[in-house]
Image (cartoon, rainbow, N blue to C red):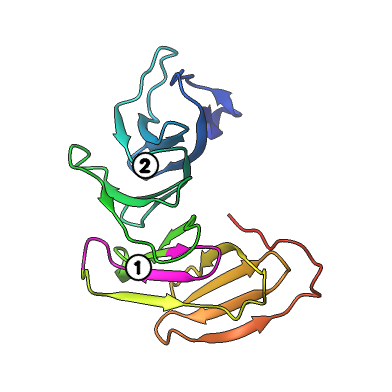
Amino acid sequence: MLDLYQGLMETSSMDLNVGVTCLSCNSGNNLLAGCTDGTVKILDGRLRSQRARYQQSVQAVSTNVRKIKVNSNQHLVAVSGGRGEVVTFDTRMTGRACQRIQANMAKPTFLNWLPGEQVETLVIGGSNGIQILQPLGDPGYVQYLTPSLTHGENITCVDVSGSGTYIAAGTDVGNVAVFEVSGGGGILYLRGSGGGGNVECD
């Protein structure tokens, strides 16, 4: 790990004995490492010992972790796996089993939590659509957003506006669709040239 305030000086190095596929963090100084064995290692970012070890290990998915997202209250974590699995867990209650989510779409990979008052609302993006649900709140609340995709066109990224009002989806032919969360309908379609390549976002 690197310290931004000390010229990117290395403060600690941890050997997890497993491949790391993605990283995320929360305001509680925890660093979350998604691994090739499907676990999420929760590390204490304040540790400065070269012999530091991870605090906890959560078995999230059955194969490699694809994406980790922490919500704005910094406790709820969403994880997607290489076999299309999506789970959530609370960093304060890691002893409990992860809650598995039924994602009704192809290749559910892209994750984001809505900010502000909607902190328990999760956005899941797959190659053919977007699903909005509340895994720890109202189990009956599910909303689907489906861009007008051409034959063979796939969603390559999904992101949420800072206000939580809009959701955007980019595709592998350079198109972008923007949806209003409250209305559920598409309000803007930006069409690419058809050969513009993937739209990508973090």
Q: Residues within 10 Å of mark 1 (few under 14, many from 20)?
A: few
Image coordinates of residue 16 in percent, x first then y, are: 43, 21
**Bounds of the magenta span?**
124-137
- The structure residue drawn at horizontal position 55% and vertical position 63%, both measured from the top left corner, is 127
Q: How many marks?
A: 2
| Image height of 172 relative to 66, above or below | below
Image coordinates of residue 179 in percent, x first then y, are: 51, 80
Task: Name the mark on residue 91.
Answer: none
Q: Amino acid at mark 1?
A: Gly
Disc 2 is placed on an element classified as loop
Q: Nearer the viewer, mark 2 or mark 1?
A: 2
Image coordinates of residue 175 in percent, x first then y, are: 69, 73
| Image height of 151 relative to 101, above or below | below
Viewer-closest of 37 and 40: 37
Q: Is residue 14 left or right of residue 4?
A: left
Image coordinates of residue 85 in percent, x first then y, are: 39, 50
Marks 2 and 1, the one that precedes in the sequence? 2
How far is the residue under mark 2 from the one under mark 1? 28 Å
Per the image, is 142 magenta?
no
Q: Can the viewer see residue 75 in this picture?
A: no
Residue at mark 2? 61
Q: Residues within 10 Å of mark 2 (few under 14, many from 20)?
A: many
Q: Quadrant of the C terminus?
A: bottom right
Per the image, is 134 magenta?
yes
Q: Amino acid at mark 2?
A: Val
Viewer-closest of 68 and 139: 139
Q: Can the viewer see residue 47 in this picture?
A: yes
Residue at mark 1? 116
